[in-house]
């Protein structure tokens, strides 16, 4: 079996996504980005928006210069679409790296890192042409001995101050790409997005009613949690910081594949003011836009594993920029 429009060496779409990721990063075939990524691709991260594959190549080389032994282990690819609308993969990665050389994270420390990434990539005819990418920056900087707020303040200063620094992703600086689909109608995607909507509408009782009591949670900052109390504390802390922010599910996938748990991937946003006490400290009134991607796996007693990513450093950067 092969993917319509793709090189026949790829057995299916997840094989393509995992395979080219290894080729680019670990096999050092960075030049393949010239044909694996379209010339005018838009890559959105919480930290910035990059337009064009030349910018992607430059960022890839800068990362590998700082972390030359970086690995990217594909934990899962939750995907939807076809050769007509485009295939979207929500690719969850566990990355390891040693901070060997000076770079954006400061002077080389020799620290060995572990952190997750989720990349939502859209591909057609062997080429990726739209992307949303979230790294667990909170986990990275904590392992390097910094808190996310401190790192954000240092980054603003290094980039030239409040007026000159690189601005995080917001709807104002986002660019509309060619992909407009919103996922699929699989029951498990709909089940997970319903849980998230209930939680964001302050129905915290959705957690004990929908999560397995023995659930495992992999959360921003490299935090692992278990059971209902940890889930409640995480989601409550986020929502309490931005109590009137608008939650939007941007893309919803559900899958029920052989030999795997039923699972879901949701890309979402939270937009509003930092006006409550929660995970982000004293309220400042700053306008904040959070891009998040979440994966969930379901079992016989409900949601059994949840992986949530957003970039704490970019949230803090917006809070600092918005409050001076």
Image (spheres, rainbow, N blue to C red):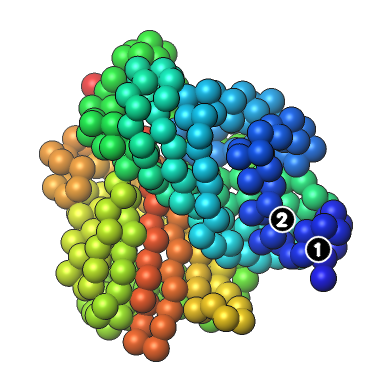
Q: Are marks 1 and 2 in contact (CB under 8 Å)?
A: yes
Does any portion of residue 146 appear in the rendered image?
yes
Where in the figure is residue 241, as x and y percent of width and height?
21, 48
Q: Secondary structure at mark 1?
A: loop
281 with respect to 323 (left or right): left
Q: Quadrant of residue 251?
A: bottom right
Distance from Cα at disc 1 to Cα at disc 2: 9 Å
Where in the figure is residue 33, as x and y percent of width and height?
72, 35
Viewer-nearest residue: 186 or 247 = 186
Q: Quadrant of residue 114?
A: top left
Furthest-top residue in view? 160
271 with respect to 31 (left or right): left
Q: Secondary structure at mark 2?
A: helix
**What residue is disc 2 on?**
16
Q: Residue at x 25, y 63 (%)?
A: 225
**What residue is disc 1 on?**
3
Viewer-nearest residue: 312 or 223 = 223
């Amino acid at each position: 079996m092969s993917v319509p429009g793709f090189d026949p060496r790829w057995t299916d779409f997840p094989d393509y996504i995992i395979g080219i990721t290894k080729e680019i990063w670990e096999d050092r075939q960075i030049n393949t980005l010239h044909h694996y990524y379209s010339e005018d691709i838009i890559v959105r991260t919480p930290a910035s928006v990059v337009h064009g594959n030349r910018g992607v190549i430059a960022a890839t080389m800068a990362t590998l210069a700082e972390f030359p032994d970086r690995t990217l282990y594909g934990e899962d690819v939750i995907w939807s679409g076809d050769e007509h609308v485009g295939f979207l993969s929500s690719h969850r990665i566990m990355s390891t790296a040693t901070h060997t050389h000076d770079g954006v994270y400061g002077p080389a420390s020799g620290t060995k890192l572990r952190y997750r990434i989720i990349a939502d990539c859209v591909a057609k005819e062997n080429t990726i042409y739209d992307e949303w990418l979230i790294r667990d920056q909170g986990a990275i900087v904590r392992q390097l001995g910094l808190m996310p707020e401190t790192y954000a303040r240092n980054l603003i200063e290094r980039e030239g101050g409040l007026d000159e620094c690189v601005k995080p992703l917001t709807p104002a600086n986002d660019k509309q790409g060619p992909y407009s689909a919103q996922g699929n109608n699989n029951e498990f995607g709909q089940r997970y997005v319903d849980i998230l909507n209930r939680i964001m509408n302050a129905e915290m009782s959705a957690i004990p009613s929908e999560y397995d009591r023995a659930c495992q949670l992999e959360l921003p900052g490299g935090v692992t949690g278990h059971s209902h109390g940890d889930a409640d504390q995480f989601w409550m802390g986020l929502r309490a910081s931005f109590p009137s922010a608008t939650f939007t599910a941007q893309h919803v996938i559900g899958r029920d594949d052989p030999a795997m748990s039923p699972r879901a991937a949701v890309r979402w946003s939270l937009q509003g003011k930092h006006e409550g006490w929660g995970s982000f400290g004293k309220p400042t009134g700053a306008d904040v836009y959070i891009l998040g991607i979440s994966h969930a796996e379901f079992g016989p007693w409900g949601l059994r594993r949840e992986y949530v990513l957003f970039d704490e450093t970019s949230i803090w950067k917006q809070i600092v920029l918005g409050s001076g």
